[in-house]
Image (cartoon, rainbow, N blue to C red):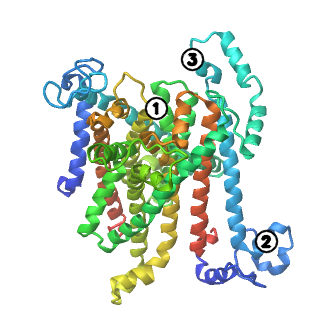
Amino acid sequence: MNLRSIPLSAWVGIAGIAITILCAIFAPVIAPYGERDVVGDIWLPAGGDFLLGTDNLGRDLFSRLVYGARTTIFVALAATVLSFSLGMILSFAAAVMGGFVDQLFSRFNDLMMAIPTLIFALVVLAVLPQHLWILILVMAVLDSTRVFRIGRAVALDVAVMEFVEAARLRGEGSLWIIFREILPNTLSPLLAEFGLRFAFSILFLSTLSFLGLGIQPPAADWGGMVKDNKDGIIFGISAALIPGAAIATLAICVNLVVDWLMKRTSSLKGGRGDA
Amino acid sequence: MESGPITGPVLTDGTAGETHPRPADLSGVPATPNPAAGTGAIGGTFWRRFVFRRPLAALVLQRLGLSVGLLFAVSLMIFGGIEALPGDFATTYLGQSATPQAVENIRKDLGLDRPWSERYLNWLGGAVQGDFGTSWASKNSVSEQIGNRLGNSLFLAFFAALISVPLAVGLGMLAVQFRNRMPDKIINVISLAAISLPEFFIGYLLIMFFAVKWGVATFPATVYDSMSFIERLSAIALPVATLVLVVLAHMMRMTRAAILNVMSSAYVETAELKGLGMFRIIARHAAPNAVAPVINVIALNLAYLVVGVVVVEVVFVYPGMGQYMVDAVTVRDMPVVQACGLIFAAFYIFLNMAADILAILANPRLRHPR
């Protein structure tokens, strides 16, 4: 793969993700004010002392946006990584063991997927105490059902290929077969799937926070910031739209990269390349 | 499907709905263990005879039964699964600092001192008859509240579906027609962006411009009983627009993919190579085979719509089920949460089932599991 083959849209996506991650890592350096400091009047317009104005309590919106990148990306990424590990391990186990284990996992997965994710999350979060790790865990478990389904399909698909059989006949162990034969050949679709799940996690976390069930104040996160500032909309104050735009931009950037990865996968498969 | 060419046509005839005297000889109906044995083998129970005579009806009944079973399992999960989670309703309800005596009182008050299996059976028995008990927070009947709000939610979802479905299918076909040219690329980029926008962002964006800046729409979208139909429609204009935008991109992309999938098959290439026009290929060759996946896409997105209603209702302060549920979750009003969860899940499951059944009806190949 050479860098020239990456289309412009994917570069835009990569740049957007990179900027957000840099903001998240160097938040204390970039942000002019503290995350929780009340620095001025409420809902000051953008410009002047405050780059994007202030929020409903008089905190600097730009600083909160930068710190919010930290929380949002950390929680979404943790949930995605966790759900991927969980889904992959269970799906490979199901595909390799087959029989009763496969049936048990698959049917339970079907049951989990029969309940809409948001509704399931609402029901579960109504019972559980509000902690960050519980939120991450709930998101990860709910999301892993999708990963499980993809992972199982992909693993079953590749496991019957000739080169896997050749490796088996060569006398390679099953760890070699999973990591050296199956994984490299499923990497591109799985990477695309990871991006897709990450984008979904960002949106899902923001939705939960917006509904008041995600990250709890006073910690800044983008969905919660929309919730905090939503009352200003009626007065024509756009403070709620800025974090909303940040969520949308990040999700679009991730999707642009995913789109390119998927196109790459489909052209590798030798299709007509337009799906 | 190695035996496709032989079994295909025969079975399609047999499943067309009429009672054929002997559709049996070649059919691979799954419930018949030994098809070669012919009519002698189909004594058996009523169900097996039924499967044999009317495979299609049997398949539909099977899906129906499966969905009811699934719904039952979901109810068990919503009630029992929650019971198994750590944490106690009474403690979470009162907060961490409650005295043991207060916790004990409220447990007795809410009937939590009885074993959970007894409470589950009570709850399920009530739910089947449409009685979901009383809310912990307001002490009102949950069913009464839901009765009012469910209608509102469905009203919203219905109009969103009415607008988005024809629009999505039309745009999807347009994108296929101009595949890889400018209109397709524009549609592709816009839909990619629309998928990435959170529902509440679209909602507030619309409020900001249409309600606040230009003043052409109303916010909040409250509806009450004395409103006329036209007033109601104008009240839900913005929520419906939001829902349409949210679901449109998904539906359109899936429609495009489904049609393109058909378009890249060998027989379409043959039609292209023998010189048929683009319109004729789409209308005569591709469309009949694309109907099944497109119907599937629509049903799946309607299921998505029912859930998407939750966030949109909160944004627009619309008195529907979604808002009721979110409010109940914040105050941990479990009877309401469970009732709403079950109803949302029921809609979701039955729309998914409808997608399944419609796909089977439209595509005879799906009627015979390999």
What is the chain identity of the residue bearing mark 2? B
> In percent of the image, x 41 and y 35: which residue is there?
A210
Answer few, some or many: residues within 10 Å of disc 3's Cα (few below 14, many 20 plus, some between 14 and 19): few
Going by the numbered disc 1, the residue's amino acid type is Ile
Query: Which residue position is annotated with label 3?
Result: B95
Query: Which residue position is annotated with label 2?
Result: B50
Going by the numbered disc 2, the residue's amino acid type is Phe
Q: In which quarter of the image is residue B75?
A: top right
Residue A151, image x and y in percent? 48, 50
* Pointer 2 with pointer 1, Cβ within 8 A: no
Q: Is mark 3 on a helix, strand or loop?
A: loop
> In percent of the image, x 28 and y 41: which residue is there?
A245
Residue B310, image x and y in percent? 49, 43
Q: In which quarter of the image is residue B311?
A: top left
> In percent of the image, x 31 and y 26: which residue is there?
A56
Q: Earlier in the sequence, mark 3 or mark 2?
A: 2
Name the one closer to the observer, B153 or A269.
B153
Going by the numbered disc 3, the residue's amino acid type is Gly
Indicate whether B271 appears above or below B174: below
Q: In which quarter of the image is residue B14?
A: bottom right
